[in-house]
Amino acid sequence: MTEYLPQDSNETSLWGETSIAGPKSVSLSESIQVDVLVVGGGYTGLSAALHLAEKGVSVVLLEAKSIGFGGSGRNAGLVNAGIWKTPDEVQKLLGPDKARRFNLALRDSPALVFDLVERFNMQCQAERCGTVHIAHKADAMAYLEDRCQQLQNLGAAVQLIDGDRAQAISGSPVYRHGGILDPQAGTIHPLGYARSLAKAAIDRGVRLFQHSGIESLVRHQDRWLARTGNGEVSAEQVIVAINAYADGKSTKVRESTLPVFIFHCATPPLPTDIAASIIPQRQGLWDTDSLLTSSRIDAEGRLVMSGPGRLHGFQRRPRENWMMRKRDRLYPQLKGIPWVYRWSGQIGVTSTKILRVQLLAPGLFAPAGYNGRGIGVGTVMGKQLADTITSGNRDDFPFPIEALYREKWSKMRAAYYDYGTLALEFISSRG
């Protein structure tokens, strides 16, 4: 078993059990001076560190726990393009010019992910087999038709599929209405991808320290000085890429999003004939239900399903049971097969469903709020931050930069969401 720290002691992560080994690195115990300090060992921080190093920039990356400990090691592994908002909705929020740069940057995010996988021979079970936004009922098709047209207007190679093809792709009689297929997207082993990014960054000269949480970050003589328990880093610029896993010492980052939980359940490897009947071409699926569920088959033939909520205390059993009932309705051939893996994690959600970058002070960037699209968005964000830092020009940066943003009543709203989804799952399982 490779090193992995689950959210709670009663969780068993499929990705932690099956990932390649993480990088061997020690905690920081010296004083270092570099061009850029990256805080956080998730997709954004690792991508930024890698792309900075490729440009000849000296980089230290500090991770408070282990690489991929946060959302980067806990998600479903669907490599999707874009964000939840449609291109037209983004335009209403950002205006035509900014929205076009924003939408185009994220339209091609799967291409960047799979290019990195190929370029560095990453061992993360990558399959560029497409993903499908699939209708859970006939009424959902009007929304998907409009969304598909907007994406096509943007130049995305997406296709509207009919009910017969949706059923053939999913292998489920429930998903018989249609959907949007993005053949450029796909799936990965999410923790394996994070660890592979770390290896690539180290190979390019990044100095990476795990179990090195920052205790203070202050401005000192036109540089930033970060202190850990046993060392310090002086840097001209800092990227704080901790998103939903910001702690009490990172108040400005923590309060910029709502911390929302997502949980995942996985079967053991299924018999070959059963596995072949479920998503036979291995696309990743996510549906249009208000209690959104994603489904995929991993490299060893396990079904992995994800939904809203946490597996904490009394919530664990009802959520697992709800997911099993939905699974058995989608795939009756799985009745009686247990969940053998279950785990959860947090995502950073914003009220607008638009990611943001806070410029907390000169040279101090804090991206956050990927709203559950972290693989593609985080990878692109890291590269774009690297490009902006090295060029010194923010004019071409495709994402909104704000001085400071705060989500009001974030803890209360997150709790409302958590218990609200639990109630809806209880009601829907008896409907």
Image: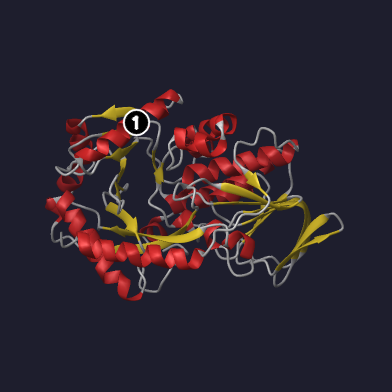
Which image quadrant for residue 229? bottom right
Residue at image x 74%, y 47%?
A: 58
Identify residue type, mark 1: Asp
Circle 1 SS class: helix
> In the rendering, at what x and y percent does residue 57 appear?
73, 43
* Residue with the most extreme right position: 221
Determine the residue positioned at 20% across, 38% down.
138
> Is residue 60 in view?
yes
Residue in front for this viewpoint, 318 or 85: 85
Q: Position of residue 358 (x, y in %)?
A: 64, 51
List x then y, in percent, for residue 303: 26, 52
Residue under pointer 1: 146
- State the residue at coordinates (26%, 65%): 320
Q: Is residue 79 found left or right of 249 in the rendered image?
A: left
Is 240 displayed left or right of 153 in the figure? Answer: right
Find residue 54 and report its horizontal and vertical position in percent: 67, 39
**Apparent side of residue 155 relative to residue 228 in the rendered image (left or right):** left
Q: In the displayed structure, would residue 28 be above or below residue 88?
A: below
Q: 324 or 115: nearer the eye?
A: 324
| Residue 112 in view (yes/no) | no
Quarter holding the N terminus?
bottom left
